[in-house]
Every structure is written in structure tokens, then in C-alpha cells.
Amino acid sequence: MDAIQKNLLKEVAALDALPVGAYNIRSNGKSTARNTTASIDIVTKEDKNGIDIIIKPGTKNQSVHIPVIISQTGIQELVYNDFFIGEDCDVTIVAGCGISNCGGLDSKHDGVHSFYVKKGSKVKYIERHYGEGTGRGKRLMNPKSVIELEEGAVMELETSQIGGIDDTFRVTEAKLADNASIIIHDKILTEGDQQAKAELAVEMNGDGSTCDLISRGVAKEDSVQEVIIKIDGNAACSGHAECDSIIMDRGVIVATPQLKATNVDASLIHEAAIGKIAGEQLNKLMTMGLSEKEAEEMIIHGFLQ
């Protein structure tokens, strides 16, 4: 693995070396490193690109890393990863994709992740997207997550686009059974003429199910962002959505909430705000010796944490 690949791996998965536990590292269209454990198996699909990650019932305090890195121009791939999480588990899954494109052809990674989380299990999922490179070729990513939570299952997602992606369409869909819960924190930073669209959709089909969806975005220069949040309350459930965005320069942000209740005991709330960086925040930081640009970057960093 060369220096570029190592840097990509660090950006998307916070790895300086191979992780402890189960992992599958995909590099330039191929699986280049893999490890399984007694509790977590990783199997290559036979009918299409991708892997099955099988987590045995009762697995606790373990992790699995499945980062994807692309360092060659012109690579375009579609990968399917399916996660089968048994009952009564508590695990962390670290994904993410990094693209370094220094050539003239577009490089693209599209990924479909399907999660089947059994009764009473808890999953934390971390996915980061990052792009870099000086070539004219674009860096493109289109991730999709499809989630099914059985009774009492809990899933927390931390998804982020931390810079350098020219065009993306990010989709997350979830269906919740009785007393299941999902928390999603989604963050997007765009600049230049980048385009980003995100769609979060949750169906609460079980009594006692809950969701908390938080989207934060920063659009700089001529970039465009669109965020669509959908919550369907089909049972005695509780759902909350929050969309906060900072607009800068000539950026464009579109935020669309969609709440639908089909049960009299469904309680759904949506909050949305779009605005510029407050002048008093800038002035306060500049009185501490920061330049205006440094102050802006500090505010943005804090906002996207």
C-alpha cells in the first residue's frame, strides 16, 4: 500500500495500520486484505461485487472495518455489502470511501449496504467519504443504506462527507419494528461547484419505535446541496428530524421535510434552519487573534462535529 492509499485509509477509517478484529479492505476495485474472527465472518459474494458480513448472536464489544479506497483514475464500481447481525449483539461497523484522482477520467464508487438487525441488538455504524487529487477527472460517490430493525433493535449512524467529492446522491432507508430505534447524524461539506443530495427516509411500523434524524450541511462557493427527510409514523411511535445548514458565498441549499402519520398515536416533529455564519461569532473569534478565514473554518468545524 503506497502513501496515497495509506492517507485515504486514515481519512475514511482513522487507520494507521490494519485494525484489530474483523476487516475487509477494498482497494482499486479488489479486496486486498481480510480477516475474520470466531464471531464475525466475511464472505465474498458469488453473484455480484461485494461481501456478506455475518455477525453471530451474542457478539459484543467487537468491530468490523470495511473501508474502500480508490487511487487510480477511471475506476468505476458498484458494490453490494449485506450485514446479518444476530440477536443480542453490540457491535461497531466502520465503513467509508476515499478517492484520490489525479488523472483525466472520472472515478466512482457506488455502494449498497443492507442491514438486517435481529431482535435486541445494538449497532453503531460510521461511514466517512473523502476525496482529493489534482486531476480533471471527477470524484463521484453514491452510497445507499437499507436498514431493517427487528423488535428492540437499536442502530446509530454517523455519516459524513468531509470534502473533495464532486457529485453525490446519498440515500438512507429504514424500517422499524416494535420498540426499535434509529439515530442518524448526517453531515455534508461542499465547495466549488460540487453537488450533493441526501435523502433520509424512515418508516416506523412498530409500537414504541423512535427515530432521531439530524442533518447538518455547509455549502461554500458555488456548490449546491439538497436534503430530503421523510418520516412515516404508522404506529404509536415518536419521530424527530432536524435540518440545520450554513450557506456561504453563492451556495444553494434546499431542505425538504416530509412527515406522514397514519396512526393517531404517532408523534412527529421537524425543525429546519438555513442561514449564514453570525457576524458576532466571527468578531468574537477575530478579537482572539484569528483571521476571518481562520474564524470561519473554526465555526464550520464545530458545526459539523
Image (spheres, helix red, strand yellow):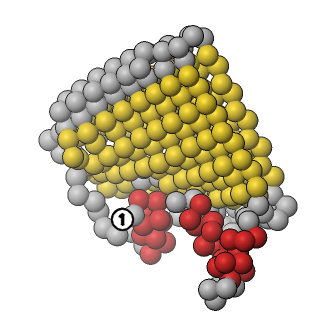
Q: Is residue 64 visible?
A: yes
Q: Nearer the viewer, residue 278 or 250?
A: 278
Q: Nearer the viewer, residue 85 or 135?
A: 85
Quadrant of the frame with the N terminus: bottom left
124 displayed left or right of 296: left
Q: Nearer the viewer, residue 63 or 216?
A: 216
Task: Identify the residue at the far bottom of this view.
Answer: 289
- Which residue appears at 46% of the width and 27% of the height? 210
The residue drawn where x is 47% and y is 65% is: 11
Compared to residue 299, the image places residue 95 above or below, namely above
Figure quadrant of residue 285: bottom right
Write down the residue under mark 1: 15
Name the residue located 56 percent from the left edge and 65 percent from the top edge. Answer: 302
Q: Amino acid at mark 1?
A: Leu
- Find residue 79 and report its horizontal and vertical position in percent: 49, 40
Which residue is situated farthest in the right direction here?
A: 250
From this view, report whether residue 279 is shown above or below residue 289.
Answer: above
- Outermost residue on the left side: it is 38
Q: How many marks?
A: 1
Residue 196 located left or right of residue 305: right
Q: Is residue 135 above or below residue 120?
A: below
Left or right placement of residue 173 versus residue 165 in this view: left
Q: Position of residue 45 (x, y in %)?
A: 37, 34
Q: Position of residue 71 (x, y in %)?
A: 53, 64
Residue at 29% over, 23% down: 119
Say which quarter of the image contains residue 125.
Answer: top left
Residue 131 in percent (x, y) is at 59, 62
Dot 1 lies on which element?
Answer: loop
Residue 220 image-quadrant placement: bottom right
Q: Residues within 10 Å of mark 1 (few under 14, many from 20)?
A: some
From where the camera sits, is residue 170 visible? Answer: no
